[in-house]
Image (spheres, coloured by chain):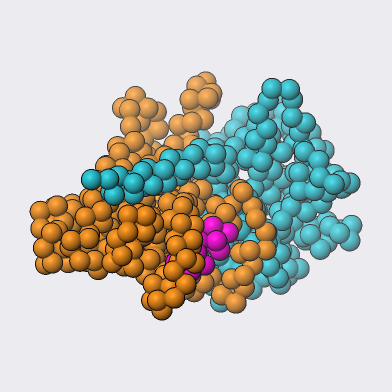
Amino acid sequence: MRHPARPAHEGETEVTIFQPPADPAARAGYDEHPRRMGFFTDTSICIGCKACEVACKEWNGVPEDGLNFLGQSYDNTGELGADTWRHVAFIEQRVAAQGGGDIRWLMSSDVCKHCTSAACLEVCPTGSLIRTEFGTVVVQQDICNGCGYCVPACPFGVIDKREDDGRVWKCTLCYDRLTDGLQPACATACPTKSIQFGPLEELREHAGERVEELHAAGVDGARLYGHDDSDGVGGMGAFFLLLDDPEVYRLPPDPVSTTRDLPAMWRSAAKAAAVLAAAGVAAFLR
Amino acid sequence: MKSGEQSMVPKADVRTYYDRPVLKEPVWKWYIPAYFFTGGLAGASSVLGLGAQLTRRRSLRRASRVAALAGISASAVLLVVDLGRPSRFHHMLRVLKVTSPMSVGSWLLAAYGPAAGAAAVPEVIGLFPRLGAAAGVVAGILGPAVTTYTAVLVSDTAIPAWHEAHAQLPFVFAGGAAASAGGLAVICTPVGEAGPARRLALMGAALELGATQLMEERMGEAGEPYREGEAGRLTKLAKLLVGSGAAVVAIGGRRRAGAAVGGSLLVTGALVERLAVFHAGVQSARDPAAVVAPQRRRLLARRPAAV
C-alpha cells in the first residue's frame, strides 16, 4: 500500500506529486525502509588524491574515458558524466591568504546529488530511473532504452549517455554495496574522510557543527551546499561543504527541479491546443 | 530584461569552472526536432481532416488524413531511431508517469497513431468508410494535443532557453503545426476545396510568428540563443519562410502555382522553426553563464545581504 509522504491538510490543494516529498523512499512506495543514506563531502579536507575516482571506477566497472591532459590544474577528468561518477575539481586561486602565500588551492570531489526531487527520475518515461529504499536514485540498466530525456533534465549536468552502449549512466551510491551493509567505494577509499557516508540526518547535523568549527577558526568562506530541504531540488542526498561560491566548483548556485513548473507547462500546452482546435473550427466557418 | 535586475550580476561577471558547461547538452540527434515537425504536421492535419469530414469536403479530407498518417508514421521511425537502444522502444509503455511529458506523450501517440491510421487507410483502399469516420473524429480530437505536448517535453528540462519558454513555446508549436498542415493541404487539394486549408495555414503562420516574437520579448537573457549563432540564423530563416509563405498563400493561394509555392514555404518554415528551437537549447546548455547568472540573481534577490 502506498501512503502520501505528507498528509494533505484540510483545504490544501493536493498537488504533492510535483512537490518534493519529505520522505522520498516512502513516496516511492516503500512502507518500511532503512534511513535515508547519503554523502557529506567536506571539501575543506580534500587533498585531491583522486582515490575516490579510482575506487569508483574499479568497483563499478566504469570504462576508461580518455587519458587526457586538460591543462586545468590537476584535473584531467573534467566533469561528471556517464563514465565519471566521482570527479575531483581543482581550483587555483590567487588570494591574500593567511600565512604569507597568495595561492589558494580548492579541491572538491563532486558526485550525483541524489536529489529529493530528482528531475532525471521524474522525466524518465520508462521507469528505468528509480528511488531505492535508501532514498537514492538509480538507473535500472535492464530497463533504460536510451531516450536521453534525463540528460538535459538534470540541473547539475550529471547523468549522461554512454554513446557506444546507448544507455545512460551515473553514480548509484553503490547500491549493491549498501544492500550488503558496506559503504560506497569512494567513501571507503577516501583517506581524509572528506567523503563521509551515513544516514542523511546525522550527516547534516555533523556538517552544521563542522561549518561552525571552521567559522570559529577564521575560515569565513565555509558554507554548506545542498543541505537544505527548502532548496529547488528539495534537498540533496549528497551535499557539500564548500569554501567558495558553488559555481566556482561547476555547481549551479540555485538549482531547481524543472518538474516543479509542470502544472504551468501543461496549462500553457492545453491553452495552445485549444487555440489550434478553435483555429480549426474558424477555418471552416465562412 | 529590466536594467536594474541585470546590473546585479552581469553575465560577463559570472564565475565558472574553467568555462565548462554546468549542464549536459541534449544527446538527441536531428531526429527529435524533425519529429516535432512531423508530429505537429500530423496532429494539425487530423484537425483539418475532421473539419473536412464534417463539412463534406472529400478531397481535403483525403489529403489531410493521408498527410496525418504519413506524418505520424515518420514520427514513429524518427523517435525509435533516436533511442540508444531502439529494440527497447516498447519500454515507453511500461508505465504511465504524469511527471514525464515523454511518458504522457508516448501514451498519447499510442492512441493517436492507430486512429490516424484507421482514418487514412479507408481513404486509400476505399473500404470501411464508417471506421474511417469514427477514427477521424478520435484523431481530430487528439491532434491538437499531439502538436503541443512536445513543447512541454522540451520545456521540462533544466536548459534555460527551453525551460523559460514554457509559456509561449506550445503556441509556437501549435502555430507551426497549423501552418504546415494547412500548407501541405493547400498543395495537395484542388484550390476550390482548399479554402479552409488556406485559412488554417494563415492563422497558423500568424500564431507561429506572433508567439515566437512574444517568446523572444518575454524571455530576456534566457532567450539570447534564439538571436545568436546557428539558432539565431535558423530563427531568422524560419520567420522569413513563414512570413513569405503566408503572403504567397494569401495573395496567390487560389491559383495552383501560388498554392504550391506558398504551401511549400510554410511547410519548410515550420520545420526550420523546430530546428531553431532545438539549436537554441543546445547553445543554452553549452553556456555556463546562461545557467549561473539567473540563479545567482535569484539568490541575491532572496538574501540581499549575502554576496
Q: Position of residue B136 (x, y in %)?
A: 44, 61
Report the front residue among B293 and A143: A143
> Magenta part mainly helix, strand or loop?
helix
Chain A shade: cyan
Question: Can the viewer see residue B160?
Answer: no
Residue in the image at 55% along x and 61% along y:
B111
Name which quarter of the figure residue B125 lies in. Answer: bottom left
- Locate the N terminus of chain B by quadrant: top left
Q: Position of residue B30 (x, y in %)?
A: 39, 67
Q: Is residue A143 left or right of residue B261?
A: right
Q: Is residue A172 left or right of residue B185?
A: right
Residue B232 is covered by the magenta coloring? no
- Asked if A277 appears above or below A170 in the picture, the reply is above
Q: Position of residue B216 (x, y in %)?
A: 30, 41
Report the front residue among A39 and A41: A39
Q: Is residue A261 left or right of residue B40?
A: right
Q: Is residue B190 left or right of residue A229?
A: left
Report the front residue among B210 and A278: A278
Highlighted range, magenta = B106-119
Residue B108 is covered by the magenta coloring? yes
Q: Position of residue A193 (x, y in %)?
A: 77, 49
Chain B shade: orange
Residue in the image at 74% along x and 25% along y:
A9
Question: Can the viewer see residue A211?
Answer: yes
Residue in the image at 22% along x and 59% along y:
B194
- Asked if A24 appears above or below A88 in the picture, the reply is above
Residue in the image at 59% along x and 37% along y:
A232
